[in-house]
Structures are given as C-alpha cells and as structure tokens.
Amino acid sequence: MKTIFSPLHAGHSGQTELVAGAIVPGFEKPSRAEIIKARVEAVKLGPIAEPEPHDLSAAKRVHDAAYIDFLPTVWPEWEASGRGGSAMPFTWPTRGLRGDVVPKTIEAKLGFYSFDAGAPFVRGTWDAIKSSCDTALTAARLVKEGQRAAFALCRPPGHHAGSAFMGGYCFINNAAVAAQWFRDQGASRVSILDVDYHHGNGTQEIFYSRPDVQVINLHGDPMTEYPFFLGHADEKGAGPGEGFNINYPMPFGTTFEAWNASLEDACRKLAAYAPDVVVVSLGVDTFEKDPISHFKLVSEDYPRIGGRIARLGLPTLFVMEGGYAVDEIGVNAVGVLTGFEEG
Ligand SMILES: [Zn+2]
C-alpha cells in the first residue's frame, strides 16, 4: 500500500489549546505524523510519496467557498494586527446571536467560521492544511486508478470540519473532500467509515441530506464526550439523506469486544449499501492509553479492524484523523493498514 505524506505538515507546530481551564501545548503535534511515517517505513508497508498540488476547487465542492478563501488569510491578518500566540476565537454566533453577518475583525471572523477554540493557527498552519487536503486527493487518485487501497497520512486531521466551520484540530475535511472527488470522478456511491474515537460531526453535517454518500460513525457518546453536540443514534440523515447517516455512540470504557460488535453491524450496513469505494476516517484515539479519550482498545486490536475492512472487498482510501498516544500511534495506525493488507 502506498502512503502519501507531506513534510509541510510540520509547520503546524507550537500551537496551544484550552484544556480544563488552562492554555497548554496542543495535543495535535507534528510528532504524530512523523511517528506514523517512521512506522510505515519500519514495516515496509510500501512506497511513500509527496502529494501533488491541487487547486482549492475540490475542497470547495464540500465547503463554503468563502470559508475556504478565509483560511489562508487567518495568520497574516492575525500577525498584522499585532496579536501573538495562536490565532483562535473566543466568541461564537450561538443561539440568539446573528450567524448571517460576517464581522470584520480577525478574532470575530474566526468565531464566525468555527464551533470551538480547538483549531488554532500558527505561521505554518495554512500550508499544512493545504498539503493535508492535497495528500487526501493524491491518495484518492491512486485508488481511482486501480490500487486496492492507499494511505493518506493527513495532518492536520479533518473530520470535525464542517461545510463552513473549523474545530477540533480540523480545518478542511479531507475525507469528505476525497469522497466528493470520487463522486465527481464517476463513483455512484461512496461510504465513509469513521472509526476515530470522536464523532465526525463535520462529515455528518456535510453529507446529512444526501443519499449518495453513506456516513457511518463509531465514537464516544456525545452525552459525555467531545464534540458533545452531534453524534446521537437518532441522527439518521434528512430528506433524501434519510437512512444514510448511521451513528454508533458508545460509553466511556468500551472494550474491543463491544466496539467490534458495532463495527460488525456497520460493515453489514456498508456492504448492503454497496458503494464503489470506501473512505476510512482512521483515528486511533480509541487506544486505551490515549491521553484525551476513553475507550480501551489495545494495539493487537488494530490489525483486526483492518482485516475486517479488507473483507468488505472494496477499493479503500485510508485518511488519517486523530490519535494522541504518540508513542504508540505508529504501531496502532499502521497496524490497521497491515491488518488490511493481510486480510
Ligand atoms: Zn478523535
């Protein structure tokens, strides 16, 4: 399996985040991607190539054009205004406020185009965002051209980013962009299988009213887990999308046995949908030692996940999402891929 990886991710570095009342170094840090890449090399998964540059038209197929055009302006405007630290908002147009007028100052615009303070910008952030999207599209092309699977080693991740908002370390929804690209290249149906610990709220929002992209999420119950405001089992899609959004919220402490029962049900529904291609939002923050998550999967479980996905027998694009237990992130993420190769 080929891996697509861009060194430009490393410029998205040194950003801070707000956790439990304190500003702390971001958990979403460059070593995550570097350790995964080193593991790809160590197990000889296959060649590693850099992404081809794309224009932003593919991203604008699933995101609001003004939102995408805003992203490269954030850091220059933040810096020019004399502000320091990481660029992040502190005010959002929630219920009772107006969400139809884009204000003029940079922190207000950041609030307009986000749902939390969890997608901070630093100097290299835009280049990393762009290269991450290019990574997904380049890997998608490999699958379109006949590869059984490809690995988009994306950083930053994407599944919390919605049609017109960032959040949760995510800016452009790489998996959604790739899924739409497959559709635009002639795929009649695409399934997105999101196995990250956190609900992929952005992916759900983007495709919620559409029957041509099935979105399946296995994740921590939003009653107790980020992103809190989406991801319940009764969210099944709207209008023509009714029945094509499937959520499996699970409680703190879920072990592989229970998690795998959800995966099995998900795979049955995915197979019944009979897509032309599967996009896997691959997060490994389901791991027992993950510092910000609460499931109990162990490293031996990840190849089994890959093996089950392989048994779907469908062209598969793996898109890297979360995972914050940095020492084990390589073993776990690449474990899914080796399990797929052997499955
Ligand atoms: Zn996650």
Image (spheres, rainbow, N blue to C red):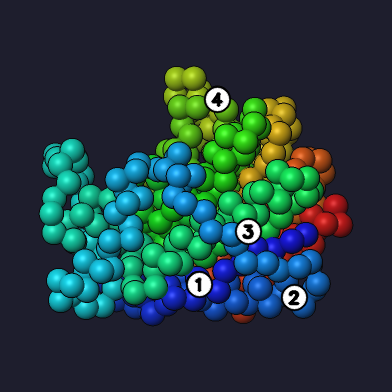
Specify the amino acid type for callout 4: Pro
Q: Residue at x 81, y 72 (%)?
A: 44
Q: Is residue 199 left or right of residue 82?
A: right
In primary-sequence order, the first of circles 4 and 3 is 3
Whether 19 is drawn above or below 255: the answer is below
Say what secondary structure mark 2 lies in.
Answer: helix
Residue nearest the observer in this picture, 45 or 56: 56
In primary-sequence order, the first of circles 1 and 2 is 1
From this viewpoint, which residue is outermost toward the top? 240
Say what secondary structure mark 4 lies in.
Answer: loop
In primary-sequence order, the first of circles 2 and 3 is 2
Residues at circles 1 and 2 in contact by the CB criterion of under 8 Å:
no
Q: Which residue is mark 2?
A: 41
In primary-sequence order, the first of circles 2 and 4 is 2
Q: CA distance from mark 4 to mark 1?
A: 35 Å
Q: Residue at x 54, y 78 (%)?
A: 31
Say what secondary structure mark 1 lies in.
Answer: helix
| Number of numbered tags placed on the structure image | 4
Mark 2 nearby-residue class (10 Å; few <14, some 14–19, many ≥20): some
Q: Which residue is mark 3?
A: 152
Specify the amino acid type for callout 1: Leu
Q: What is the quadrant of the N terminus in the image? A: bottom right
The reply to whether residue 133 is visible in this rendering is yes
In primary-sequence order, the first of circles 1 and 3 is 1
Q: Position of residue 132 (x, y in %)?
A: 52, 61
Q: CA distance from mark 4 to mark 3?
A: 25 Å
Q: Which residue is mark 4?
A: 211
Which of labels 2 and 4 is toward the front? Answer: 2
Q: Which residue is mark 1?
A: 8
